[in-house]
Amino acid sequence: MIKSTFLNLLIVWCLAISTSCSSTKNLSHANPEKKLGWKLGSQAYTFRLFTFAEALDKIDSCDLRYVEAFPGQIIGAGSTEQMGYGLSESGRKLVKDLLKKKNITLHAFGVVGAKNEEEWEKVFQFAKDMGVKVLNVEPSEGHLDVISRLCDKYDIKVALHNHPQPSKYWTPDVVLAALKGRSNRMGAAADVGHWMRSGLDPVACLKQLDGRVFHIHFKDLNTFGDKKAHDVHWGTGKLPLRDIVNELKRQKFSGMLSAEYEYNWENNKDDVKQSAANLRAIL
């Protein structure tokens, strides 16, 4: 009797272990980026025509668990407040509740700016309160030292973002010069699509920024070297996707990849979903 009971318990235990291992394996296959430490998510600006609450619904339906919020988006879910440091306590609680409900992490915030040191402090205080890990910015040169100090004070990373030429940080040379002598918590928010629009090789740019890439704005475009180029599903345009993946692996990148699909604005949820699937298939 005792022997039979022990045998039954052993069988149940083995089945439980087998099921657990199978679930872990399936999760690994479904979200291979996790093994690399990559946080695959979306820039809420992709869904700028909608509220933040609606953007979270769309991000969730794409099987993405991270979001980069942007300043000015209406919160929704009964609130007309806008995303940013001006959010009231009740507004911040609502955002946190919405994130928890969807099991989505607010990892980054940007692209955000400020007029002076006092306002930058408010931005950092807001980021700290909301659990933001990376602020994506395009500050004036005169604000770089202020930002460097605040990075260390609040233990928050700041990443300099590149828009196309002739914006200030369009080339890695300018980014590296701005980072020199400043906090190690300052790095780059690499927008591979904007590099392509500026006629820059995105793989070469990533190599130039080796070790300082904190965040990625991920895009694939239909043409190269054209500021009017538009987004297409990842892996179907001119972005050397496999080379990008290999370079990020080589650098042991561990930040967030924000899907920023700035095309088909009213109905681009499925575009983001397919793009994420294409990337995961390569991984």
Image: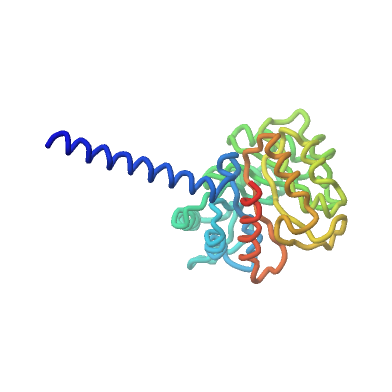
Q: Image quadrant of residue 225? A: bottom right
Residue at 60% across / 46% down in the picture? 122
Q: Quadrant of the N terminus?
A: top left
**Left or right position of 243 against 259:** right
The image's colouring method is rainbow
Residue at 68% across / 57% down in the picture? 260
Residue 52 on image: x %, y %: 56, 62
* Total number of numbered discs in the rendering: 0
Q: Is residue 134 visible?
A: yes
Residue 152 on image: x %, y %: 62, 32
Q: Image quadrant of residue 269? A: bottom right
Residue 240 on image: x %, y %: 78, 49
**Left or right position of 178 against 157:** right
Residue furthest toward the left?
A: 1
Residue at 62% across / 49% down in the picture? 109
Residue 106 on image: x %, y %: 55, 50
Q: Is residue 89 visible?
A: no
